[in-house]
Image (cartoon, rainbow, N blue to C red):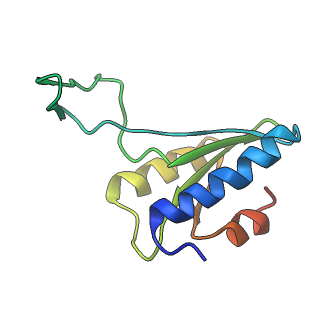
Amino acid sequence: MASNESEIQKAILDYLLIKERQGKLTYWRSNNIPPSSFNNGKKFYYKTSIHAKGGIPDIIVVKDGLFIGLEVKDKSKQSESQIEFEKCIKKNGGQYYIVRSIDDIIKIGL
């Protein structure tokens, strides 16, 4: 059984890949670069776009025309920016879930 966020996330992504190959949904993993992060190998800072937003869910799913944000957590809680992004998604007709296992994914119908 997956125990930390990265293991849980990998298991969920593997599950969603199967569903995508069956033509049931599409998904992608959101990778956020922290504001002004330094790339040690290339010796420069990544400057964050003014249009970049914090709190974006870890995984985005589109199923039957519906936007679904999945925030993967082990035992940790959402950050303030994640809570705000959740509110925006729901306000605009999307769905947002905190998921801690593949069982959570199945319960929400994915």
Residue 48 horizontal side relative to residue 83, left or right = left
In front: 80, or 30?
30
Which residue is located at x 40 percent, y 47 percent?
A: 55
- Tell me where residue 29 appears, x and y as whole percent: 55, 41
Residue 3 horizontal side relative to residue 23, left or right = left
Question: Quarter of the image containing the C terminus?
Answer: bottom right
In front: 104, or 97?
104
Residue 37 occupies which quadrant of the picture? Answer: top left
- Tell me where residue 105 appears, x and y as whole percent: 71, 63
Count up the numbered dots.
0
Q: Is residue 76 above or below residue 79?
A: below
Residue 43 horizontal side relative to residue 104, left or right = left
Residue at the far front in the pictured view: 41
- Tell me where residue 52 appears, x and y as whole percent: 35, 29
Which residue is located at x 21 percent, y 23 percent?
A: 47
Which residue is located at x 45 percent, y 47 percent?
A: 85
Q: Is residue 109 above or below residue 63?
A: below
Residue at the far left in the pictured view: 43
